[in-house]
Image: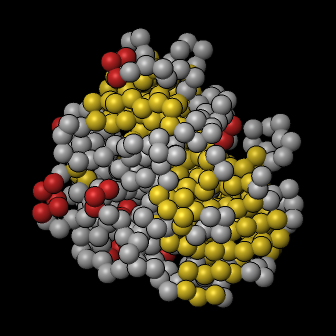
Amino acid sequence: MKRRQILKGASIGMGAAFLPAPLFAKPNVGGGWGDTAEVYLQGNFGPVEVESTLTDLVVTGSLPKELSGRYLRNGPNPSGEVDAGHHWFIGDGMVHGINIRDGQAVWYRNRYVQGGPNTHVIEHAGKTLAIVEAGAKPTEMTYDLESVGRHDFGGTLTGGFSAHPKRDPDDGSLHVIAYNPGPPPFVLQYVVVSAAGKVTRTVDIPVMGPTMVHDTGITKNWVIVYDLPVTANPALVQQGYRFPMQWNPDYGSRVGLLPRTGTADDIVWIDVPLCYVFHPMNAQEDADGNVIIDVCRYDRMFDGVYNGPFDSNSELTLDRWTLNPGLRTCRSDRVDDRAQEFPRCHPELESKPYRYGYTVTVDGDEFPTLLKHDMQVGTALSLDLGPGRSSGEAVFVPRDGATAEDDGYLMSWIYDKNTNTSEFSVVDAQEMRQIAAVKLPVRVPYGFHGSWVADA
Ligand SMILES: [Fe+2]
């Protein structure tokens, strides 16, 4: 193992705002989570201390030979001293990646992200980009995960970016809702990045307060603007909290439908249940023109708990919202009562009608089961990972030549508490059966989001 010093100076600049990232929470279950920073530094939430490059990795099972590329995932890995005001979402970014080719695992690497982005890592227009919300620009990384520097899409990104771009499968463009939770005026920005990697459109969207916007969604005709009751409270900064976002039910809870070619004046605002949503599974339109979004919904967030999203008083469920733009109504239906997060679907069906979605259950400080939802039939298949084993977000990768929507693989990092190590996991998504693992001698801390980046 090649060991390197922990990089210093990779901390997130407050000028870019405290930021963000997100993910799961601990809901619907007890579990001993408290309102302290320590809980987000213990066990597999804790950072790793070295950047590793590992080769000669052993594959168990069979890695599909058609897969050639990198599976990458970003997450927080605080490198310096933290105090009681620490929040899980603000740790320095670290990308964990594995390179596979011809059924072999070529390397595993973990590298700090210079500049702070700690939430997601994507490939766009030939660039590997670590990204985050709340004002910071992406950080470009090399194939081997070394940070190159800030990336502003050739000078065309004038404001901030987001941790959750939605890619239009028809033209390869990216669509984000960006924000900077600073002082008034409070303005979100809808930003479109072309497949060639240039910002082609920026639309300002005034809102009523410094709301935290984590994700978005697109459909054929609309962009979805979440305007939900978690807002920045400067008083929390005075109290020493590094991430001063707070549940604010008086703010209201609404979703805006922005026509893809429209402006803020064209937005159809629709009240939704009082809640917070980090992540939608997908968005689509039905034959009647309704907009359907499937969301991991918390009935509250950061309500007296300011070190992370885990809150035993918060209920997390998978819900379907059917929004009628003409009547400005929202019908909410419960899809699954189980606490679950990190929803993903087939990448070519984002924004379109789809059948299958994938999540991970949340149980205290563990994530023990992968779920495959049949969103049309209303059933779910589960893969229990076994005692002490937890999966992060599972990324769906279609099999070459697949014709069935679920014909493909789920890639994730699985942590095993029994050995305090992690493995790269590949699951057959049709059967929900693990078909390959690459076991590491190190662990991959719980983190946020990632991508499969096939070699060109
Ligand atoms: Fe997220």
Residue 245 falls left or right of residue 158: left
In the image, is 164 to the left or to the right of 409?
left
Residue 345 visible in the snapshot: yes
- For image coordinates 43% across by 16% down, the residue present is 325
The answer to whether 45 appears left or right of 13 in the picture is right
Q: Quadrant of the N terminus?
A: bottom right
Residue 355 at x, y = what percent? Answer: 67, 34
Residue drawn at 58 percent across, 88 percent down:
3
Question: Front-most of 21 and 202?
Answer: 202
Q: Position of residue 201 (x, y in %)?
A: 47, 30
Q: How is the image coloured?
A: secondary structure
Residue at the spot x=34%, y=43% of the render? Answer: 179
Q: Count the numbered circles shown.
A: 0
Residues 140 and 408: in front is 140
Q: Does residue 442 lie above or below 170 as drawn? A: below
Across and down, in percent, residue 58 comes to 79, 79
In the image, is residue 437 above or below residue 294?
below
Q: Is residue 403 left or right of residue 195?
A: right
Is residue 361 among the parts visible in the rendering? Answer: no
Rendered view: 75 above or below 133: below
Residue 117: x and y in percent read 44, 60
| Res 128 quadrant in image | bottom right
Residue positioned 30% across, 77% down in the render: 82
236 is higher (above) or lower (below) than 418: above
In the orientation shown, which residue stands out farthest toward the front? 155
